[in-house]
Each structure stands twice: as C-alpha cells, then as structure tokens.
Amino acid sequence: MSELPDAPSVEVAVSCNEWLELCPEAAAIAARAAGAALAEAAGPSRFIVDITLTDDAEQRHLNHTYRAADKPTNVLAFPQCGSEPVASQMPVLLGDVVLAFETVRREATEQHKPLADHLSHLVVHGVLHLLGLDHESAAEAAAMEAREIEILAGLGVPDPYRGIM
C-alpha cells in the first residue's frame, strides 16, 4: 500500500497562452506561490488547489456567473471545503484560484511591478481566501495583508502594498 504524500498538491492549468508568452515560468511561479501560502496552513497538509491562468473574457464570465459582477477581475477564489477544519487523512480539495491575464498585466504595469511578483501576490491572496481569510473589515484586511507580506517575503517578493496605498 502506498503512502499518501504530506505536501499539498497544486495543479496549474494555462488556458491563455499570453501568460506563457510574456512570462514563460508563470505556471511554476503560481505553483510555488500557492505552495508557500499552504505551507503554514492549519489542518491537513494534503490540500489540493487548482489554479487556472486565463484571460479577461473567461474571468468576466466567471465573475458574472458566480458573483453577479459583469466585469473581469484580477483573481477569483472558489473554496470547495467550507470554513470548517477538515479531519481527514485523505487529500482534500481546498478549491480553485483563477487569474485573468489582461487585468493582472495591466495592474502590474500601472503599479510598476514585475508581472511575476504581481502574479505571486495574487496567487497567495487567492489561496488565503481558500483558507478562510478575508478583507471585509479593516481588521481582516490588515491581518490578510500582513500574512501576504510575510509569505511573499519568503519567496523573495517585495511588499506588494508598499508605495500603492
């Protein structure tokens, strides 16, 4: 009988080739950022996270369908296992994170950030949403941002909020 892996599983699908044209290592960057966000998560280490690197058209469709917002957005997170801790030895699908190429690229340009750094930030942000963090209140936002900054620092990515507030 084979032993189950202890590390989280991160699958990255690229449905918009522009990601790879502008940033050939985009899938690896996304997987690394998700892994870093999951590394300190409470609960099972056998989380499964799916990441999709798509375009604004698909993101707009998803945003409209699931959030009633008829516009693209940089990142969407779709939790699958709720906010309750999961006591399982089996792998648990934590959820999906979807990122829109044109919006992410535009934001990176406007904020004078490398696309790879902005991608890392938004993947970490999305995974933290899957883990139950949010930014509905000022206190929640401050806690989530502090966690993002800490995780990104471990990846060598500068504070994403410095200079844009």
Image: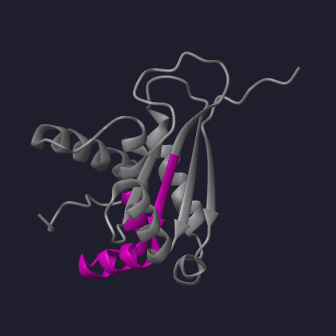
Q: Residue at x 17, y 62 (%)?
A: 162
Q: Position of residue 64 (x, y in %)?
A: 39, 63
Residue 108 occupies quadrant: bottom left
Stretch of the chain drawn in magenta = 96-122
Q: Residue at x 39, y 48 (%)?
A: 154
Against 140, residue 33 (above or below) is below
- Taking the image as shown, residue 74 lies to the left or right of residue 146, namely right
Q: Position of residue 44 (x, y in %)?
A: 55, 24
Q: Position of residue 14 (x, y in %)?
A: 61, 68
- Taking the image as shown, residue 3 lies to the left or right of residue 140, namely right
Instruction: Name the quadrant of the C terminus.
Output: bottom left
Magenta stretch encompasses residue 128? no
- Taking the image as shown, residue 28 lies to the left or right of residue 123, namely right
Residue nearest the observer in this picture, 12 or 26:
12
Q: Could one spot residue 165 in this view of the protein? A: yes
Against 16, residue 127 (above or below) is above
Q: Residue furthest top?
A: 87
Against 125, residue 44 (above or below) is above
How many numbered discs? 0
